Amino acid sequence: MILDQLADYARVRVAADKEKTSLDALQHLCADGAAPSRPPFCFERALRGDGLSFICEVKKASPSKGIISKSFPYLDIAAEYEQAGADCISCLTEPKWFLGSDRIFTDIRSRVNTPMIRKDFTVDEYQIYQAKLMGADAVLLICALLDTQTIAHHLEICEKLGLSALVETHDEAEIRSAVEAGARLIGVNNRNLKDFSVDFSNAARLRDLIPADCVYVAESGVKNAADVAALRSIGADAVLMGEVLMRAPDKAALLAQMRG
Ligand SMILES: O=C(O)c1ccccc1NCC(=O)[C@H](O)[C@H](O)COP(=O)(O)O
């Protein structure tokens, strides 16, 4: 299953990174203020504005779609998102299937001020400290990979570091786990990460299970302005879009159309 492969490879990457820099050293760097200075929890605040917020994703490839952007001018893409008024930017750093990297993230970080989530497969607290040192404003915690206790522990670390955490779910049980762990930002993914199928009705079906004080983020499978309008009508607080924007020749125009 692809999610297991992504998680296994994330563990290999973390082990290799720990050989170079220990968890203890990363924690000290964070405590000593070595991370780029960012407004605490700005990712969450950006999504709590009026109306539907937009998280725009920068990704070269994905396991389900292969190469999405051959030339991948990621700095231009991020700058275009910022100019077009994206509320937040999601940047994939997973290298094998998404062809992302920490370098892409830090390059974009130094170019834009928009709140950014480091989108990776978090399997170890080490990655949260890494994200902080990269200048991330948020990390992704996927319920299918983490039990409730571990999510709660990771949320505590995020809280301490001033980072937001997008806790991603796909079904009722995962939403229960996210809520029990104390998540404030809950994503409902329309894509089943186990078999790639996309059911656009998933976000609407599960909407009522998200507590009113949480930010509700609908993720994946948005194809056009009508899809965005549907998510707005079910009361989504934010939408996370990747492929449709990456393939759009005029991203700013598409975003403007989706904003309505
Ligand atoms: O997109 C995939 O193929 C995928 C496979 C396995 C794990 C995660 C995957 N995608 C990550 C995402 O969450 C999406 O990049 C994101 O939600 C945007 O989706 P889309 O708008 O459909 O590009």
Image (cartoon, helix red, strand yellow):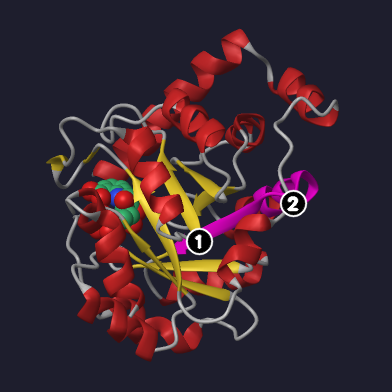
Q: Is mark 2 within 8 Å of ligand 1?
A: no
Q: Residue at x 33, y 80 (%)?
A: 260
* Crowding near the residue tagged with mark 1, few <14, some 14–19, many ≥20 C-alpha atoms within 10 Å: many
Q: Are marks 1 and 2 in contact (CB under 8 Å)?
A: no
Q: Position of residue 14 (x, y in %)?
A: 51, 24
Label 2: which secondary element? loop
The amino acid sitting under disc 2 is Pro
**What whole-number distance in Å separates the C-alpha atoms at marks 1 and 2?**
15 Å
What residue does disc 1 label?
87
What residue does disc 2 label?
40
Q: Which residues are magenta?
A: 154-168
Q: Quadrant of the N terminus?
A: top left
Q: Nearer the viewer, residue 217 or 253?
A: 253
Q: Position of residue 152 (x, y in %)?
A: 67, 57
Q: Quadrant of residue 94?
A: top left
Q: Residue at x 68, y 54 (%)?
A: 155
- Quick one: which residue is furthest to the right in this view? 32
The amino acid sitting under disc 1 is Asp
Q: Is residue 158 magenta?
A: yes
- Position of residue 252 relative to residue 70, above or below, is below
